[in-house]
Amino acid sequence: MATPQFADASRDLHGTPLAEGVRVRVLRAAHGDRRAAGELALRLSERQSAGLDPLPAEPAAVAPALLRAHRREIRELPDDTRRLLLLAAADQYPLATHAFLRATAAAGLDTRPLDAAETAGVAWPAAGGIVFRDPWTRIAAYESAPAAERRSAHQLLARVLGGKAEAPYRAWPRAAAALGPSRRLAAQLGPAADRARRTGQHILASALVERAAD
């Protein structure tokens, strides 16, 4: 039977039958996006779907063709544009926190380079931050960046997510910015997952629970 924290996170991946834990891991690999997760689920082997064989850690290992063109588009953008898109992509996984604008303001980042992304039709500004053309563009914006830049983006987001109400959201970028497993960090993720679950943020709760187990 599905545990409460995984129940909402595991529904409707294009009708593909998956073991419960596999559904959660596929959603995590797809950066929390159900459409992208559904496409990834269709590409798993029967043994992977049943949880008998390990899943690839990155979407590119499951669906390289889907990401290849999107990555090419991202890499053709100016460096400053790509860094802003990385921050926006990190802000939207596993759940949008709408901290992008606060993060750019806190770091004194110039958002004008986003014009290049809008001109290319890759992403554009909106009231809550940045809208990506599709989930694979968002994933490509994140995965195309070096690991050190990803950690820096998460550190910046964690810095601006303050207050008790944002504690579950802050826990994720803190974990994502960590260089390796930490007992202290794992101890913080459990309560954050509980709070996320109580407020109905099941995808975030699932991601925090799985990260705590790493």
Image (cartoon, rainbow, N blue to C red):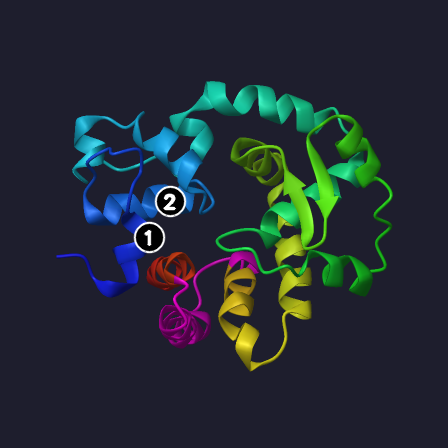
Picture coordinates of residue 185 (x, y %)?
Answer: 46, 71
Q: Secondary structure at mark 1?
A: helix
Picture coordinates of residue 126 (x, y %)?
Answer: 71, 48
- Dot 1, crowdedness within 10 Å: few (<14), some or many (≥20)? many
Q: Residue at the spot x=42%, y=24% of the render?
A: 63
Q: Nearer the viewer, residue 120 or 174?
A: 120
Residue at image mark 1? 9
Answer whether residue 69 is visible to the viewer in this image: yes
Q: Residue at the spot x=39%, y=69% of the render?
A: 193
Answer whether residue 149 is visible to the viewer in this image: no
Q: Secondary structure at mark 2?
A: helix
Assess whether residue 26 is covered by the magenta stretch: no
Q: Quadrant of the C terminus?
A: bottom left
Q: Quadrant of the N terminus?
A: bottom left
Q: Residue furthest bottom?
A: 164
Predominant secondary structure, magenta span: helix
Dot label at residue 201 = none
Assess whether residue 181 is covered by the magenta stretch: yes
**Contact between labelled residues 1 and 2, with CB atoms less than 8 Å apart:** yes
Q: Residue at the spot x=78%, y=57% of the render?
A: 104
Above or below, comparing residue 170 to residue 127 in the picture: below
Rendered image quadrant of residue 145: top right
Picture coordinates of residue 27 (x, y %)?
Answer: 38, 44
The span picked out in magenta is: 176-201
Q: Answer with left or right where residue 202 lies relative to residue 117.
A: left
Dot label at residue 27 = 2
Picture coordinates of residue 200 (x, y %)?
Answer: 38, 66
- Dot 2, crowdedness within 10 Å: few (<14), some or many (≥20)? many
